[in-house]
Image (spheres, helix red, strand yellow):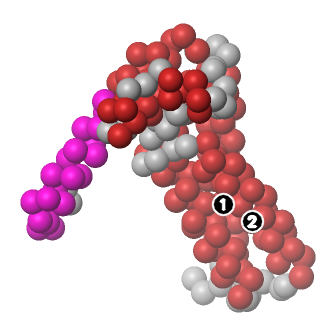
Amino acid sequence: FLPGVKTEYMMSADADNSVTWRFEIWRYCWERAPEFFWLGRGSAFDVYNAVDNMSRNDILTFSPLFAYTTRSYHSGPLALLIDYGFPGFIVGSWLLISIGLSSWKIAVRMRQYDTLESRYCIALASWLIWEVMSFYLVYGQMPKFVRIIIAAAVLKVLSQSIHKIYKPKKLET
């Protein structure tokens, strides 16, 4: 699944199955999304009611029904759309894009300081950019969304503190 990289058969089969499985979940969830388009269905669920509506096989195989019922869509955009509706999708996407762009700007600005704190800021900003991208492209679940917001607040406060305390170094051009 990586161009030019040889992998064992079982590893390749597992990766292929993971992709197929995700597409099954997304298709199942996408078919149900119109029902919750405007208001969403919320992010909480009752485990006991969820289990009552599924077979043992659904739970053991992590079927699309199980993923849908437990809000484990493996897709950030679907999580925002189904759980919070179209308005939540727009607001959540705007917030994440803003955090990604802000993190990028902070990382660039922190290059002008030569301190341990500025290096930490650059590392945190890089991690946040990855988290935002992976929320959309790899594995987007709402606990990740909350972690991103908290880390973005920490990054903002830390970068403002560094800007107030330290003098910038001259950058080589």
Residue 54 visible here: yes
Q: Is 8 a magenta residue?
A: yes
Quadrant of image for the N terminus: bottom left
- Residue ID at (90%, 76%): 164
User: Principal SS element in the magenta part?
Assistant: helix
Q: Is residue 88 above or below residue 75?
A: above
Local SS, label 2: helix
> In which quadrant will I find the C terminus?
bottom right
Q: Which mark is residue 103?
A: 1
Residue 66 % position (x, y): 43, 31
For label 1, count other residues whose C-alpha is less than 10 Å away and answer few (under 14), some (14-19) or many (20+): many
Give the label on residue 170, or none: none
Q: Which residue is mark 2?
A: 155
136 or 34, which lies in front? 34
- Residue 2 lies, in percent from the top left, at 20, 60
- Where does the magenta region start and end? 5-24
Compared to residue 1, the image places residue 49 above or below, namely above
Q: Position of residue 57 (x, y in %)?
A: 32, 33
Q: Are marks 2 and 1 in contact (CB under 8 Å)?
A: yes
